[in-house]
Amino acid sequence: MQGVKTTRRNRPDKMTPQLIRLITALLLYAWTLQPALALDLSLPDMGDSSGSHLGSNLEAKLGRAFMRYVRAHSDVVDDPLISSYLQSVGNKLARHSDTRGRNLTFFAVKDPTINAFAGPDGYIGVHTGLINEAETESELAAVLAHEIAHVGQRHLARMIEATNQMSLPMAGLLLAAIALGAAGAGSAAAAAALGGQAAMVQKQINFTRANEREADNIGIRILARSEYDPRAMASFFQKLGRSSRTGAVTVPEFLQTHPVSADRIAEALGRSEKYPLNMAPEDLRFHLVRATLRAEQFDSSRSAIRHFESTLGEGRYRNEEAERYGYVHALFRGRQYGKAMQELNKLLGKRPRDPYYRVTKARIALAQGNKSLAISSVSNMDTSSIGSVAGSLLQAEVMLQARQPARAYNILKQLSKSRSDDAHVMRLLGRAAAGSGKTAESHRALAEYHYLSGELEAAVQQLGIALRTPGIGFHEKSKLEARLREIDTEIRAIKKTGRSGQF
């Protein structure tokens, strides 16, 4: 659907054997179903002592560098409805973990494989394939709880410390390449990173099991305290293990040869039995997000429409309301706007101010050319379930599409004060500023968008255009020149590493 926006980049289809070995050795950066699969190649327990050497400022910078390269090599989902839901589940879990007081960032990556990964400074990514495969919210929460446990126990700290020997941009590139398998023959800098780290990584390969089982144990405790089903972790991975053996689901290629570890699943089930089954009611948003993603996973809109017509007709669904919402998305994708609006109105009759339904109504109205209806739809929606930031972003998106850039600019300018490291915010701000006649500011915002997306050369180009804008003031020019020097320095560091193979 049009609303599920992603940051799209070209990625190599195959990983080199060298990269596969490195990813396996550093599995904590790309945790992909280890509890279900016997991949006992995790790092040793590093404890909090290693974290004492790593300054929070450095880790934050490394996290931002990591995220830039994630965006450069994967399809990060920028739809605020999906992002805010994942963040809300993650925050709920984090409140009952050892990460209290830290700001964790949860995001979705549009990818059919079943995968999740954690990076430095609490960045946790989840593939849409995993969200689709989870049948209950507790199953999705189990994955996030496991990742949160890794962050809370600082299992990444020692490896992050090792990045002190390399430039910050290259450290981020290395970690993102590990997490995504993004470094192929066409990435000289990443290839250099792989070679430079080979000796250090080899020392870690023989350490097994401890970290993953600790994350299992702590993750189950987090689930129980957050009122999710503590049995969901073991049962979900057991189900995925069975599916992977029969070929029913897609798992990353380098994991397919590893068998399911029955004893590990049994241990997790045993731990979960110690906690009472005191689950909170399942959040409707979980089913709405899954329905949105399922409507997009079919090869054609016709197939998606047939699927939802079949499930609704035969009663094959976990939640009828969400299934109908998926049908609306499938009809929208097939450009059957009138029928989509008709089906959506049935849902709005039950929840007239629901933000999912209101935003979808706005998107359909825009497709029909009804701009006033689109704007009114998002102007009076209830944002309590998605948060004020997501609500403001959605309103700005609709206003931009309705060709009211000045109204969108006012919203985005305010958001950018606290979210200047949000690529989606900066991209929209760039568009809104351009439409409002603020040329220099538009190019500056787009420069930050490209920078945050790992496109450093494009960022430099945008800054250059901004500097050539007629009538630019001295203060603004100084800030642009300073930012240009910063990015130029980073580009030279990356190119130097690519040539020399040293950090």
Image: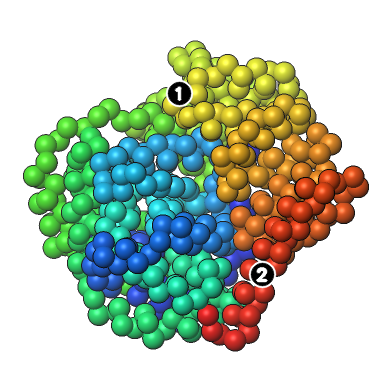
Residue plotted at (31% across, 30% down): 282
Q: Which residue is mark 2?
A: 489
Who is closer to the viewer here, 23 or 463?
A: 463
Q: Position of residue 395 (x, y in %)?
A: 62, 28
Who is closer to the viewer here, 126 or 318?
A: 126
Q: How many marks?
A: 2
Q: Which quadrant is the N terminus positioned in?
A: top right
Report which quarter residue 237 is drawn in.
bottom left
Quick one: SS at disc 2? helix
Identify whether 331 is placed above or below 378.
below
Q: Position of residue 387 (x, y in %)?
A: 48, 29
Q: Amino acid at mark 1?
A: Ser
> Are discs 2 and 1 less than 8 Å apart at CB?
no
**Tag 2: Cα neighbours inside 10 Å, few (<14), some, or many (≥20)?**
few
* The disc label shown at residue 414, or none: none
Residues under labels 2 and 1: Cα distance? 43 Å
Q: Can residue 235 be seen?
A: no
Identify whether 149 is placed above or below 37.
above
Q: Amino acid at mark 2?
A: Thr
Who is closer to the viewer here, 152 or 145?
A: 152
Report which quarter residue 225 is drawn in.
top left
Residue plotted at (29% across, 54% down): 152
Q: Can residue 475 be seen?
A: yes
Identify whether 474 is placed above or below 497.
above
Looking at the image, is mark 2 or mark 1 earlier in the sequence?
1
Q: Which residue is mark 1?
A: 384
Decide if residue 208 is on the left or right side of residue 367. left
**Tag 1: Cα neighbours inside 10 Å, few (<14), some, or many (≥20)?**
few
Question: How is the rendered protein coloured?
Answer: rainbow
Residue plotted at (55% across, 28% down): 391
